[in-house]
Amino acid sequence: MRALASAIVLFAINIIGLGLGPWLIGISNDLLAPAYGDEAIRYSLGGVGIVNLWAAAHSLLAGRYLRSDLARARGAEESDPDVGRFAGRDTITARTSHSRRKRAIRS
């Protein structure tokens, strides 16, 4: 399942990056050409750089919450063994810990 998810993500990234990227730079170059002439490509590529910095800033902001989200997922996993499958643990590990709990309760 993880391989399929990563394949889909990489496919989407490539479609967006290799398909839409040059197209958007070309359109912005055509729109800026009447005002800036041959320098329009410089501003088109600079605009893409600014968008990349904006995306990097949002990735860093989202990363600030990663540790607390993982801790919360681990806490939920302890109360419900089926959550472990969705919190990044393997299904086998989650089932094993669940069966150990059942044996401990029966004893």
Image: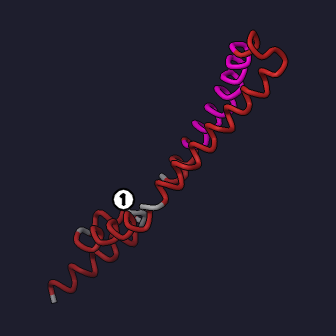
Q: Main secondary structure of the magenta part?
A: helix
Q: Quadrant of residue 85?
A: bottom left
Segment colored magenta: 9-31
Residue 23 percent across, percent down from the top left: 68, 21
Residue 6 or residue 42, whichever sits in front: 42
Q: Relative to 92, does residue 42 appear above or below in the rendering?
A: above
- Taking the view exactly as shown, the residue that stands out farthest to the top is 34
Look at mark 1 in the image and give the residue it sits on: 86
- Taking the view exactly as shown, the residue that stands out farthest to the bottom is 107
| Count of number-bearing discs | 1
Residue 99 percent across, percent down from the top left: 27, 76
Residue 71 percent across, percent down from the top left: 36, 70
Residue shown at the point (53%, 51%) measured from the top left = 59
Q: Is residue 98 left or right of residue 28?
A: left
Q: Is residue 7 left or right of residue 90?
A: right
Quadrant (top left/top right/bottom left/bottom right) for the C terminus: bottom left
Q: Check disc 1 and report its element: helix, strand or loop.
A: loop
Q: Is residue 82 left or right of residue 63?
A: left
Residue shown at the point (65%, 36%) measured from the top left = 14
Which residue type carries mark 1? Answer: Phe
Residue 66 or residue 36, whichever sits in front: 36
Residue 60 percent across, percent down from the top left: 53, 55
- Taking the view exactly as shown, the residue that stands out farthest to the right is 38
Residue shown at the point (32%, 77%) measured from the top left = 97
Q: Relative to 60, does residue 48 appear above or below in the rendering?
A: above
Q: Quadrant of residue 15?
A: top right
Asked if the stretch drawn in magenta spans residue 49, the answer is no
